[in-house]
Image (cartoon, coloured by chain):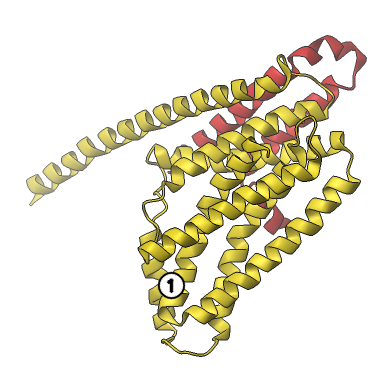
Chain colours: A red, B yellow
Amino acid sequence: MKVVLAIYNFLVGDMIILIGVVITLLVLALIFTLPFLVPVQAFAGYLLIIAVLLVLGMTLSREVRGR
Amino acid sequence: MEWAVATAAFLASTVEFVEAFTIVLVVGVTINWRSALTGTLAAVAALAVIVAIFGTALVQYVPIDVLRMVVGIILILFGLKWLKKAILRYSGWKALHDEEAIFEETMADLRARGETITPRLHPFAIALSFKSVLLEGLEVAFIVITFGSNAASVGNTRIAGITSATAGALVAGLLVILAGILVRSPLKRVPENTLKFIVGIMLTSFGTFWTIEGFNGSWPLSDAFIPVLIVIYLLASFAFVSWLKTLKRNQQSAVRPQAALATETDEVHS
């Protein structure tokens, strides 16, 4: 458990960033796997950019609210 | 030479080496330089072994598509962590890293332990400088391996990426040591937060690019879209800094009238 915690703290250390990125990846995996979502693949990059910025905004907002 | 990789590794390494240098300096000044340098060299050797083993293993055995996706995701996580800290520091929500304060604090700790200048190799001093260089250097090693193994452009081998990243890190290390020898005090003038901000932007941009490529997706303009990503994240980060600064100002102006009211009430009651 300590090893997992150490890796988590080394890599990210922030649950909002971790969960946000994991959810985004699941959505991307669906987009690139399901046949009926093929038309969306062209916009996957833009979706990822928006998701990354949303995650950043959410974690910053949480930090500010906590102080 | 992969210049983007070398630059990212150089900037990230500068930040981490400045932080490690502060502790090595304390050990050198408080106990002795032999122990401080022995610990440092041992940590550098350990880091070189880590980069050589993991870097070679990744390049040799992991297919490029898998590597791009995994490294892309890790770089997004890592980049967001750096970017968040830098934005909070720029906007005044988090204190700037103060090397001089860390220097004084560590020196006080060592003196409280009863450590004094001694000519012999000192196990605690070696361990302290080893630990600080290894811990700070691990982030650098991680960036060198992930960034370097993934970044080889057309015509270059993947080892070229790691070599470029290592070169960037080595130059940063040498510059920090040189500056330290010249200044002989904590390197407080190095703009650590700005470097952290730039590295955060670069890691997030490359991470975003490679994640989509790892899924076998494509970007408009291909590799030329990376600068566009950098600009997007840069503008968004400036917007976040501006938003957080406004929140900070609002919070301070809301606190001031309350404090003044509390003082007036106290005066009336007394």
Residue at 63 percent of width and 53 percent of height: B139
Q: Is residue B18 left or right of residue A9?
A: left
* Position in image of residue A17 (x %, y %): 64, 38
In the displayed structure, B239 sits above or below B84; it is: above
* Position in image of residue B128 (x %, y %): 55, 74
Q: Is residue B126 left or right of residue B146?
A: left
Q: Secondary structure at mark 1?
A: helix
* Position in image of residue B146 (x %, y %): 73, 45
In the displayed structure, B117 sits above or below B212; it is: below
Neighbour class for label 1 at 10 Å: few (<14), some, many (≥20)?
many
Q: Nearer the viewer, residue B124 or B119?
A: B119
Residue at 56 percent of width and 22 percent of height: B232
Q: How many marks?
A: 1
In the displayed structure, A18 sits above or below B55; it is: above
Q: Nearer the viewer, residue B119 or A36?
A: B119
Rendered-image quadrant of the N terminus of chain B: top right
Residue at 59 percent of width and 75 percent of height: B39
Residue B210 appears in the figure: yes
Quadrant of the image occupied by residue B224: top right
Amino acid tagged 1: Val
Residue at 86 percent of width and 21 percent of height: A32
Q: Is residue B24 left or right of residue B135?
A: left
Residue B18 appears in the figure: no
Quadrant of the image occupied by residue B264: top left
* Position in image of residue A57 (x %, y %): 54, 30
Q: Nearer the viewer, residue B12 or B3?
A: B3
To which residue does mark 1 refer?
B26
Q: Identify the subunit bearing mark 1.
A: B
